[in-house]
Image: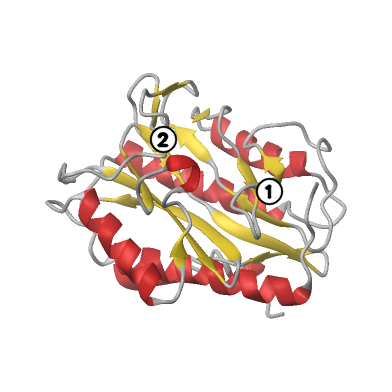
């Protein structure tokens, strides 16, 4: 059952999503060769708590950390560890927070120093596909239109779009209806309505779309051990159009990146 949100609920959801965005921006200043992902996990945990919220991932289904941190061939749900990140790595950081009774859920794949051009392109195309999916989040269209836009953009570049893992509705619970696959047919799936709130999150592999689920019950890696990228935004439908609840602007401020990619999806309510 899809839970459509009121204007007041959308305002609260924006606050929770933006706290996650600020958390990722804080982490962006710290991510560099030689640090451990356990260090990042503690920073995020303390930052979220200090802002009057709770880490949404900690204890969720038994998950033992506040961040999902997935380097290189790890697709999603990686455990923070004592292993140091290295120059040339990529690091997908997925963060969640519960504030005012609502969940923010938001992810970004970071480049560690200088990465290979082909990996840089994977990240670029994956992030582009996120915004192509968001652009389809319009009243009267269907979830399959989002899915198709993501899949077609990534597959034309030869990348593998993960099919076993999907985006999802988000609200008072981390995972609500509907599921939002990153593949599918135009015109299929649930009709998009005002008040819909979803987490759109392309998970895209350099090589094969196939993945391996590990014995820890969480970690997912590419089957061919090639790199993977993951970007995620929380999106609402308001007055028929897609509106971003989350933002990458805090990450970009930390990294000195200029971008107007979010401009079409910014609206006050």
Q: Is 25 placed above or below 218 here?
A: below
**Structural crowding at the residue carrying mark 1, measured as other residues with C-alpha within 10 Å and reported as few (<14), some (14–19) or many (≥20):** some
| Quadrant holding the C terminus | bottom right
**Structural crowding at the residue carrying mark 2, measured as other residues with C-alpha within 10 Å and reported as few (<14), some (14–19) or many (≥20):** many
Q: Is residue 5 left or right of residue 267?
A: right
Task: Determine which residue is flagged by label 2.
Answer: 75
Q: Observer-nearest residue: 124 or 85?
A: 85
Element marked by disc 2: strand
Q: Is 257 placed above or below 221 here?
A: below
Q: Position of residue 106 (x, y in %)?
A: 50, 56
Please report whichever mark, 2 or 1, sits nearer to the chain's N-terminal start.
Answer: 2
Q: Is residue 88 left or right of residue 94?
A: left
At a point 62% along the width and 69% down the height, the residue shown is 13
Task: Determine which residue is flagged by label 1.
Answer: 176
Q: Position of residue 201 (x, y in %)?
A: 55, 46
Q: Is residue 204 visible?
A: yes
State the colouring used for the structure image.
Answer: secondary structure
At a point 33% along the width and 63% down the height, the residue shown is 44
Question: Which quadrant of the view contains residue 172?
Answer: bottom right
At a point 24% along the width and 42% down the height, the residue shown is 89
Q: Is residue 251 visible?
A: no
Q: Observer-nearest residue: 9 or 64?
A: 64
At a point 71% along the width and 31% down the height, the residue shown is 184
């Amino acid at each position: 059952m899809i839970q459509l949100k009121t204007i007041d609920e959308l305002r609260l959801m924006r606050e929770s999503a933006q706290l996650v965005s600020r958390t990722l921006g804080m982490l962006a200043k710290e991510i560099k060769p030689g640090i451990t992902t356990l260090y990042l996990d503690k920073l995020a945990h303390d930052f979220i708590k200090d802002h009057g919220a709770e880490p949404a991932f900690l204890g969720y289904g038994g998950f033992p950390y506040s961040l999902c941190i997935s380097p290189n061939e790890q697709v999603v749900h990686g455990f923070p560890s004592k292993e140091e990140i290295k120059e040339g790595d990529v690091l997908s950081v997925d963060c969640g927070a519960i504030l005012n009774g609502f969940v923010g859920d938001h992810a970004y794949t970071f480049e560690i120093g200088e990465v290979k051009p082909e990996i840089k392109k994977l990240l670029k195309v994956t992030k582009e596909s996120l915004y192509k999916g968001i652009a389809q989040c319009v009243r009267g269209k269907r979830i399959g239109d989002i899915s198709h836009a993501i899949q077609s953009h990534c597959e034309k570049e030869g990348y593998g779009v993960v099919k076993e893992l999907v985006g999802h509705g988000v609200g008072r619970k981390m995972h609500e209806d509907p599921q939002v696959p990153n593949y599918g047919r135009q015109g299929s799936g649930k009709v998009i309505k005002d008040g819909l709130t979803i987490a759109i999150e392309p998970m895209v592999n350099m090589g094969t779309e196939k993945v391996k689920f590990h014995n820890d019950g969480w970690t997912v890696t590419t089957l061919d051990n090639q790199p993977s990228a993951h970007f995620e935004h929380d999106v609402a439908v308001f007055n028929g159009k897609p509106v971003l609840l989350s933002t990458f602007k805090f990450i970009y401020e930390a990294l000195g990146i200029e971008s107007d990619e979010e401009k079409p999806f910014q609206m006050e309510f």
